[in-house]
């Protein structure tokens, strides 16, 4: 019986040391020092841009995600998280793939009319959402006992929240009219540019 008591006491001591290492040590008044030995960033490639970014939208989403463990009470296992995410989505027109005949200039007439140019314009597309890391955070979280104990020894992976937030923002951008605004802005830009050169512009779609 005594050896059992001794084993139990040893286990309790080990658990106490583990908890102290996780909870108490980081709170020492002396604090901690962070040493950054990372190497500087290296340039891997250069490329020319042929995209006209014609509009941008700013979005925010609050995720309410619950992970339920089957047949186990929520007080014991599982968690529910409110995650706030914010970011932007750009809509752009890519001129890089235009064929040589995408811009056709009408012959000059002797009647004094303004010269005309026909532009086959591709539709605008949405870029991947760009999340603002400083505005993405866990707002609130409810966790079962086992999940709270596990958080003492390991950090929760927040990557699934970022992935879900990107998808929600991308869906919202598709329904926001951002693409149509980019199309309109691109036409206005080209109309003004060619107009300054004395041309009237007629647009056709490549789609």
Image: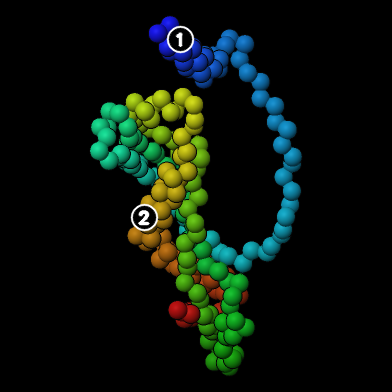
Image coordinates for residue 125, horizontal then vertical, percent: 47, 66
Image coloring type: rainbow
Write the residue at 47% across / 72% down. Answer: 123
Mark 1 crowdedness (10 Å alpha carbons): few <14, some 14-19, many ≥20 = few
Image coordinates for residue 14, horizontal then vertical, percent: 50, 15
Extreme residue toward the bottom, this view: 110
Tell me if I can see residue 9 in this picture: no
* Residue 150 in the figure: left or right of residue 46: left
Write the residue at 42% across / 64% down. Answer: 179
Image coordinates for residue 65, horizontal then vertical, percent: 33, 42
Residue ID for mark 1: 3
Mark 2 crowdedness (10 Å alpha carbons): few <14, some 14-19, many ≥20 = some
C-alpha distance separating marks 2 and 1? 64 Å
* Above or below for 166 versus 118: above
* Above or below for 129 versus 73: below
* Above or below for 118 versus 56: below
Residue ID for mark 2: 172
Tell me if I can see residue 197 in this picture: yes
**Viewer-proximal residue, 92 or 24?**
24
Image coordinates for residue 138, horizontal then vertical, percent: 41, 34
* Residue 44 in the figure: left or right of residue 129: right
Quadrant of the frame with the N terminus: top left
> Which numbered disc flags the more N-terminal residue, 2 or 1?
1
């Amino acid at each position: 019986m005594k050896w059992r008591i001794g084993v139990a006491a040893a286990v309790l001591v080990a658990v106490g040391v583990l908890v102290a290492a996780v909870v108490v040590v980081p709170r020492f008044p002396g604090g901690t020092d962070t040493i950054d030995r990372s190497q500087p960033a290296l340039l891997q490639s250069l490329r020319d841009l042929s995209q006209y970014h014609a509009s941008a939208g700013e979005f925010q989403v609050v995720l309410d995600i619950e992970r339920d463990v089957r047949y186990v009470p929520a007080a014991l296992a599982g968690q529910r998280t409110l995650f706030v995410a914010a970011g932007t989505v750009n809509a752009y027109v890519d001129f890089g793939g235009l064929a040589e005949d995408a811009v056709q200039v009408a012959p000059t007439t002797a009647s004094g009319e303004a010269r005309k140019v026909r532009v086959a314009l591709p539709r605008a597309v949405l870029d991947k959402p760009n999340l603002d890391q400083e505005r993405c955070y866990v707002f609130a979280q409810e966790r079962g006992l086992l999940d709270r104990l596990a958080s003492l020894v390991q950090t929760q992976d927040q990557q699934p929240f970022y992935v879900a937030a990107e998808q929600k923002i991308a869906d919202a951008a598709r329904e926001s009219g951002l693409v149509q605004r980019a199309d309109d802005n691109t036409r206005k830009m080209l109309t003004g540019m060619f107009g300054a050169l004395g041309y009237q512009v007629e647009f056709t779609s490549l789609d």
